Image (cartoon, rainbow, N blue to C red):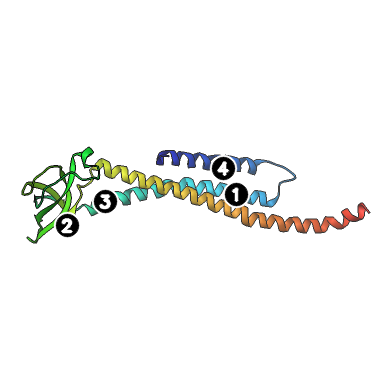
Amino acid sequence: MSVEAGWARKHKRVTAMGAQTWRLMRRHSPLRRGSDVVEACVGLLTVLLAAVFAPLAGVIAAEATSALLVHQQQGWHRTAAVLTGDAAFTTTGAADTGQAEATVRWSAPDRSSRSAVTEVPAGTKAGTSTTVWIDAKGRLRHPPLGSDDRAALADLAGGCVAIGVCALAAGARRAVVRVELERHRARAWEREWAEVEPRWTHGHA
């Protein structure tokens, strides 16, 4: 399931919970208990908090992710490298992609010689020149993400955070209702039964 579908599902669930809560608050019934009103208020508060903070948290997470990716890739640049060995086909899917692993050597910004294994076109011979990406310290890096890829990852992070906020709010509401309110209702029922039970018993004696 995609992040968009998950967010839509969570949003639909929270909206339905808010509508149910509003109907419960407006309903006039002699059987409505004080805990029912509290439950309705907790539900409405949950909906309001999720509606406000889920999108806000998603936007903040998306912007933070985008800024982090840009920061990580600062100083990355291409540099010339030379294969120190032949790039033969491997068993890691090279036959399908046309790529193979090979050791390459390049000069870092401090003019020191570096070497590492990277992917190059399969069949490339030792001594062949190629191009690799390195960071400001001369370490080998993968090609940097483009703006579209960064935006997609940022949106993914934002959507996950927004869904998480909705799930957290729904979980907190469930904990309050299921644990605290049910415990309060049980105690209230026991008190009411303690008052009614003697009359009930005597009336049927």
Of the numbered discs in the image, which one, if any, rests on residue 201? none
Give the quarter of the figure containing the C terminus.
bottom right
Name the residue located 24 percent from the left edge and 50 percent from the top edge.
70
Residue 147 falls in image quadrant: top left
From the viewer's perspective, is 23 left or right of 156? right
Q: Nearer the viewer, residue 37 or 122?
A: 122
Q: Kindly identify the amino acid type of the residue bearing the numbered disc 2.
A: Arg
User: Who's the residue at 77% across and 59% down the image?
Assistant: 191
Left or right, 46 with respect to 124, comes to right
Question: Along the polypeptide, which appears first: circle 3 or circle 4?
Answer: 4
Residue ranking furthest to the right: 205
Residue type at mark 1 is: Cys
Task: Look at the image and tell me whether residue 168 can be seen.
Answer: yes
Residue 43 is left or right of residue 129, and the answer is: right
Residue marked by disc 3: 69
From the viewer's side, name the closer residue of 77 and 181: 77
Residue 36 spot, x, y in % from top left: 66, 49
Q: CA distance from mark 1 to mark 3?
A: 41 Å
